Image: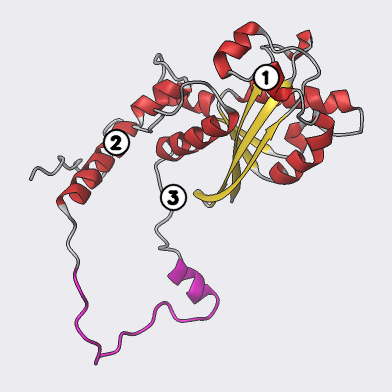
Amino acid sequence: MRQIVLDTETTGLDPAQGHRVIEVGCVELIDRKLTGRHLHLYINPGREVDAGALEVHGITNELLADKPVFGAIADTFLDFVRGAELIIHNAPFDIGFLDHELVLLDRGYRRMLDYCDVLDTLAMARKKHPGQKNNLDALCKRYEVDNSQRELHGALKDAEILADVYLMMTGGQSSLGLGHDAEAEAAGGEAGGKLDGERPPLRVVMAAADELEAHARYLQSLAAMNEGKVLWAPAEPHSS
């Protein structure tokens, strides 16, 4: 499963008022694991950045002056995201702007939903945490994701943070590799190998105190995410 965590920055709030995309940040997940692949683009919008938007993201007109226009990066962007599930916080905002950019090019591009599926983490968070703050900073605090570097909004930084939040919000690691034996059996192979009876004793490495404490905190966070409806009693943090 290929997913792209995506964020944009813009000149203002409404494409219908002529506002444009000025930054795109994308982070790739495959099978819920960060691959290290990303796409980061600054874009010349052909207009001034609104003062209110500048206060949010700090991207100046001077920084954008020598950057390519959206038409010059459209194929690079679509090639990177095509066929993936896009994970976006407040997806209607970003998808609305990207659709607007594609329409403005008048090259026969389709809308984003024709290239990708979209998952809105804001809608997901509101369902999981009704009546609470569900902006990205609030979710970072709730799921103990470090956002200390986030003094201003930035598309790539916010995409990286959202990737961590999404993984925590949806239960962390999705698979422990327990399906490999079944797959091998289905393919006609053996479910597992046999250990050599002459092998030396296996080395046992015990968890350190800080590792036990981190594990206990993780179990508690999973329990909190599921309102305590878990099959184990959350471990108390280890005290040395």
Above or below 203: residue 78 = above
Label 3: how many residues lie within 10 Å, few (<14), some (14-19) or many (20+)?
Answer: few
Q: Is residue 228 magenta?
A: no
Q: Amino acid at mark 1?
A: Thr
Residue 118 appearing in the image: yes
Instruction: Report whether 163 appears left or right of 77.
Output: left
Image marks 1 and 2: residues in contact by CB distance under 8 Å: no
For marks 3 and 2 on the same chain, the one whose residue lies earlier in the sequence? 3
Which is the main secondary structure of the residues drawn in magenta?
Answer: loop
Instruction: Report whether 160 appears left or right of 155.
Output: left
Residue 73 versus residue 81: which sits nearer the camera? 73
Residue 127 versus residue 204: which sits nearer the camera? 204
Q: Which residues are magenta?
A: 180-204
Instruction: Tell me the residue that label 3 is attached to.
Output: 174
Residue 12 in the image: state x and y as whole percent: 68, 12
Label 1: how many residues lie within 10 Å, few (<14), some (14-19) or many (20+)?
Answer: many
Instruction: Tell me the residue that label 1 is attached to.
Output: 10
Q: Residue furthest left?
A: 240
Residue 193, image quadrant = bottom left
Q: Amino acid at mark 2?
A: Ser
